[in-house]
Image (tube, rainbow, N blue to C red):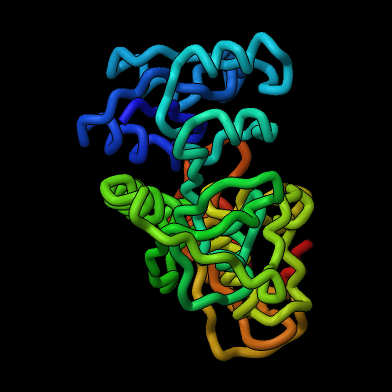
Amino acid sequence: MRVIFMGTPDFAVPTLAALHEAGHTIVAVYTQPPRRAGRGKKVQPSPVQIEAERRHISVRHPASLKDADAQAGLAALEANITVVAAYGLILPQAVLDMPRLGCVNVHASLLPRWRGAAPVQRAILAGDAVTGITIMQMEAGLDTGPMLATARVQTDRKSAGELTDELAQVGAQLLVGTLIDIEALRAVEQDDTQATYAAKIDKAEAQIDFTRAAEALERQVRAFAPFPGAWFTLDGERIKVLEATVLGLEGKPGTTLDDRLTIACGHAALQPTLVQRAGKPAMEVEAFLRGKAVPAGVQLG
């Protein structure tokens, strides 16, 4: 097929690679423009742009797909289908209607659960035992289109980073398999009554509230690892928690119960095992405590 690919973050890279390696002609890649990132705030291209250029595929990053010039450029590519994976721009109806086979989306949830921007994080926060990938025929609504294929993935105790990486690989293979017989597939409409919304993550959500149950806080840690990182304050310093376990101990919420940074919660206790200080690399909690002892009875913020 002649394919237009639209995607931006690391999640989209395996799908781009799988499409290319399956022998499809990728006539252009659309991605978000280079932006300043990292500690040095250097201008960096998106992961998808890096992969596309490595494969010598033409890259475009318009600010919008709503204007006539952008749409004319898309139409001139004469693609059979557009594949979208975490692109970051809304596709107007004219763009959705342009390819003969329409536009399909690789979405990181089992729709209609977790429509929206942060399906992986919301699934972990909610304690979902299973999530997955849906290949969806796109329409104007937010992740409301009919479903062409799904694949289930166990969440287990994976962080958002680990689960996203696994879903990216599963989605890439599912998409390539779906394209083989896409014209023979019968899309299944979503049940809107079962829909849930995966709102974009607000950094304020990452602050740990120790009055909550430790089980919920452990999910918060995994949902926000590696970014933005669940955190608490110790002596005015923000400490990110990247991994943690739940212990069956009780005490005043937010108070350390021993010298190993076991912290009492509203129910049970949370013991961080991997932490990060501002401007420092992640470290095992034992290494952190060697540099900054925290005795029992300390109240954390």
Q: Percent from the top left, x then y, of residue 48?
A: 43, 27
Q: At 40% across and 12% down in the image, what residue appears? A: 58
Q: Residue 87 versus residue 97: which sits nearer the camera? A: 97
- Residue closest to the eye, 90 or 132: 90
Rendered view: 159 above or below 180: below
Question: Residue 236 in the image: x percent, y percent?
Answer: 78, 49
Say above or below: 287 vs 39: below
Name which quarter of the figure residue 36 lies in.
top right
Q: Is residue 247 above or below residue 21?
A: below
Rendered location of residue 197, percent (x, y): 71, 62
- Residue at left 60%, top 12%? 72
Q: Judge from the rendering whether residue 197 lies leftward or rightward of residue 288; answer left or right.
A: right
Q: Nearer the viewer, residue 176 or 212?
A: 176
Q: Is residue 206 visible?
A: yes
Q: How many marks?
A: 0
Q: Nearer the viewer, residue 275 or 1?
A: 1
Can the viewer see residue 285?
no
| Residue 137 x %, y % | 52, 49
Kindly identify the residue that appears in the image at 34 percent across and 39 percent down. Answer: 14
User: In the visual, does 176 lie left or right of 265?
Assistant: left
Q: Is residue 264 left or right of residue 227?
A: right
- Indicate the quadrant containing the C terminus: top left, top right, bottom left or bottom right: bottom right
Q: Residue at x 31, y 31 (%)?
A: 1
